[in-house]
Amino acid sequence: MCYRKRLFVALIAAFCFSGCATVPFPSGRGIAARDIAFENGFSKVIIRGHNFALISFVRIEKKGEPLVIYIEGDGLAWKSRSRVSFDPTPTDDLVICLAALDYSANVAYLARPGQYSSLGASRCDMKYWTGSRFSEEVIEDMNMAVSRLRETAHAPSVSLIGYSGGGAVAVLVAARRTDVASLRTIAGNLDHEAVNKFNGVSRLNNSLNPIDFTDEVKKIPQRHFIGSLDRVVPEFIIKSFGEKEGNKDCDCITVLEDATHKDGWRERWRKLLLIPFSDLTEQPYRDNFDF
């Protein structure tokens, strides 16, 4: 049976990160994310690639040290199961909040194509947040953005952290790089074909699939977080990815009790960051991490 670390964690009711709350109305999404970033020492950067201009928020405190990059999820890609959104900017500020909570010296947040056009990102065809959201041209520009951010920080390496669809992007970017020190995903869509089949929605026919790139990333130290109550990306998706990498014990997976796809992460994030990585180049590490 696959070994899993389950965390039984009491919610820290008194902990509330300043400025981090769901933004229900589209008109305020860009302003809210920008304000959270600025209040926590980040600066806005627009990164222009071959295909897109992407929004990033960057906090560099010690140039020359490693850089941690948080990759945003799919955002508001669909208004309903049958209606595509005209603006994929996230309605929830989870990922920028997690980036703000990170204690690393150099941290960056990287949005996806089409997100935050109100802040200067390029508008693009809606296919890039639907069926082509993980297409070659998307991953090419996301990879280029990672390189630009690394250059800005003069960083010797990067650590990638991706949420939901951003987890897929993190894997696909890591698969083509040699400078990735670690890889983390949160509720990561690591096999979009299986995820979409599970949810009864159409396939992403024009997208690369992370689970096809396990050989390219299996030697990178990694940790995959999934909520026990996640009904969008079920736990078996993460388990299948780990097993395909050759991690038969699945000790690269941490299941967070009572967490859903988007709830239960902020309150525990700083402690989750302390959990060691699984490294297939060494003996599997099993911890008894006590919250």
Image (cartoon, rainbow, N blue to C red):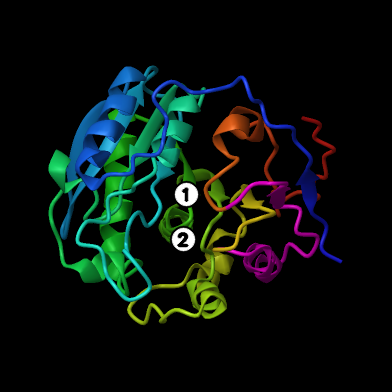
Image coordinates for residue 161, horizontal then vertical, percent? 49, 44
| Residue 98 badge | none
* Residue drawn at the location 54% of the way across and 64% of the way down: 190
Q: Residue furthest front?
A: 24
Q: Vertical placement of 169 versus 106: above or below?
A: below
Image coordinates for residue 11, horizontal then vertical, percent? 68, 31
Image coordinates for residue 269, horizontal then vertical, percent? 59, 33
Residue at disc 1, secondary structure: strand
Which residue has dot 1 on it?
A: 162
Please state which of residues 233 and 284 is positioned toward the viewer in this rendering.
233
Pointer 2: residues within 10 angstroms few (<14), some, or many (20+)? Answer: many
Q: Vertical placement of 20 versus 247: above or below?
A: above
Residue 259 lies left or right of residue 73; in this view the side is right
Are the residues flagged by discs 1 and 2 in contact, CB closer than 8 Å?
Answer: yes
Residue at disc 2, secondary structure: helix
Instruction: Name the quadrant of the N terminus.
Output: bottom right
Look at the image and give the residue range highlighted in magenta: 233-260
Q: Amino acid at mark 1?
A: Gly
Q: Amino acid at mark 2?
A: Ala
Instruction: Name the quadrant of the C terminus.
Output: top right
Q: How many numbered circles does the render carry?
A: 2
Please state which of residues 160 and 271 is positioned toward the viewer in this rendering.
271
* Residue drawn at the location 43% of the way across and 20% of the way down: 18
Please identify the quarter of the rendering in which residue 50 is found.
Answer: bottom left
Distance from Cα at disc 1 to Cα at disc 2? 7 Å
* Residue drawn at the location 60% of the way across and 40% of the way down: 264
Which residue has dot 2 on it?
A: 168
